[in-house]
Image: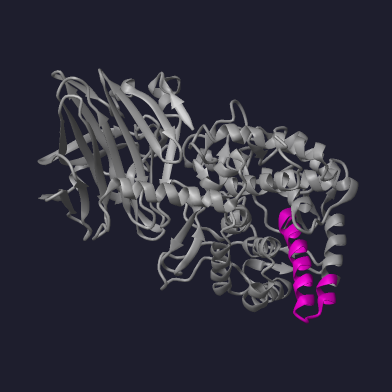
Amino acid sequence: MEFGKADWRTFERGIEKEWLLTNGIGGFASSTIICANTRRYHGLLVASLKAPVERHLILSKIDECFTINGKDYNLYSFQTPDYIMRGYYNLQRVSINPLPTFTYSVEDAFIEKKICMVYGQNTTVIQYRIINGAAEANLRLTPLINFRNYHHSSRSEFLKFDVSKAPNGAIIKPAYFNTDISLLCGEGEFTVWDGCYFFNMYYEAERERGLDYIEDHYIPGCFDIKLKSYEEKHVTIIATLEKEVKDCCGEKLISAEEKRLKALVSTAGYGDELADRLVMASDAFIVHRESTKSRTILAGYPWFTDWGRDTMIAFTGITLATKRFEDARDILYTFSRYVKDGLVPNVFPDDESHEPAYNSVDAALWYFEAVNKYIEHTDDLKFINENIYMVLKDIIGHYIKGTRFNIAMDSDYLISAGQAGIQLTWMDAKIGRWVVTPRHGKAVEINALWYNAINIMERLAGLNGDDAGYYRSIAEKARKSFEAAFWNNRKQCLYDVVINDYRDSSVRPNQIFAVSLSYPVISGEKAKKLVRKVWKELYSTYGLKSLCGSDRNYRGIYTGDIHSRDSSYHQGTVWTWPLGHFITAFIKAYGNTESNRRLALKFIEPLRDHLSDGCIGSISEIFDGDGSNAPKGCFAQAWSVGEILRAYTELIAHGSGDLQ
């Protein structure tokens, strides 16, 4: 993807687009396309001290100044409360294919910067290729250092470091951490600056979120790179927390990462531009977790870690559609080891001494869908039967007899869960004691998932010599009860929640899963009416609104402080991930014909455009329900990417040739 000066005519336009690199252990690098940091989460090295958590900002940025003919040209951009540095005036072009590359033009010289993270290491590589002009010149590279939790911000009085020169750079020792920061450079001279700080970096994105938005950074010194007339020079800075860097050659490190990323696309084998981009995007979310010694899926960047619910929803797209079957097996097996009282962990602890959190009614049910999709993609029944089947049986047993959080099958064979004040579904926003979207009782998607899980269990029971008829009987009774309890004849769709005699008629996207899952609980004409209702009332450009616009509780703009944002999070904000299920439901309800597949692709096309907006190459967590549908929340979300990749690849797989 290529970008030019039209994308940063103003500072405000230049900070709209962001880029992201990851290292497979939870660490990342990110900024805007003009390299002006606007979030506390932006930085060239955000390291994970215990994969994939304990993330800390280490290297905020490197400020570049090119001096030629006695004049300084600043290539860097930033904002303080009373000043904007506009180094982007010298930025000519940005390319992200797949690594971000920035080309600057100064008089008769060019400076190209490429950024890369080393996979599996807390290491960032920044490579400069300088093509000098007629006069001698100097490139000064000034690193801005920090060492703080990535959710926080620092002021100068807490930034204490000891800096010493090394043969090929500098070693920086934080006063409060027993971890050295190494800045390595094969070219140039490093000059140590004592007690120097960058004061008052201004983070506009944090101000909008009602959080601290001013921060200081420590400046340990600078590298000076001298250039002769018409000289071309390659300079690499390596910022790392690793005790040993096996290879300090920037070219080799960058080449290895580019080769790894291209191999992922080749393995997936689509040869389709959109699918290939989504395959590349999916790589950011598959990471190693040290506490479980296995793979997991991070929910989103820049601030989420791994959650059970998000992992299972994103699973099919992130691991199976990308043909990363070994990672898929690892994830399924890991979660099976931690199932307790029939529940799949919603959140893993950061260390082995603490128990996971199990506060989710749907994670275990999404686990069944993940298992079923794994079988569809791999035919690997042996792995499931030997390692997973008994866990699934245990989950069903606990849901039938009852388990934590009042989760239990009722006399009508439907699942009831929770109580007032406790949030167990994905619509879980809670501000103090205020539950924004109370959904205790019988939630529509929970019971669609329950029916789906029972049917999957019936099939596997038959293959394992168990009584499949037992599960078939429960499924049939649950199906009849579901339709009687949830069908809203007046609105021709499904109620969202049923509690005793109360029916919540809010039109929400949760009902779409009654049609989209492997075993739909609603079919025929009712399925068509349901899908049409969701299309008419909830579809927006980038996904489905979490509440229809005519509802008195609708809030279409997600902005402001935590109270304001959480009060709109599931009350009108657009979510991308349910769009994947809407597309599947549309095809199931109206038929898998070429004309319907072509129509379904129209729902995806805006997201093709979005890949060049927001976080370039990825899909945001949420969007405003009103106005321009601006991207909000995490700028790269696993279930957004995973569900669009799953739905899209299923569409093109069933087509004959190019359906675009």
Give the total number of marks visible in the rendering: 0
Question: Which is more toward the observer, 487 or 327?
Answer: 327
Question: Which is more toward the observer, 231 or 584?
Answer: 231
Depicted 173 relative to depicted 157: above or below: below
Say left or right for 551 vs 101.
right
**Magenta part, dominant SS:** helix
Visual colour scheme: one colour
Question: Which is more toward the observer, 446 or 332?
Answer: 332
Quadrant location of the C terminus?
top right
Residue at x 44%, y 69% (from the top left corner): 293
Q: Which residues are magenta?
A: 443-472
Question: Measured from the top left, where is residue 35 in percent x and y?
Answer: 35, 33
Question: Measured from the top left, where is residue 519 in percent x and y?
Answer: 79, 59
Residue at x 60%, y 26% (from the top left corner): 627
Depicted 21 relative to depicted 337: above or below: above
Residue 85 visible to the viewer: no
Residue 185 visible to the viewer: yes
Depicted 5 relative to depicted 429: above or below: above
Residue 621 in magenta stretch: no
Say left or right for 201 vs 653.
left
Say left or right for 191 vs 363.
left
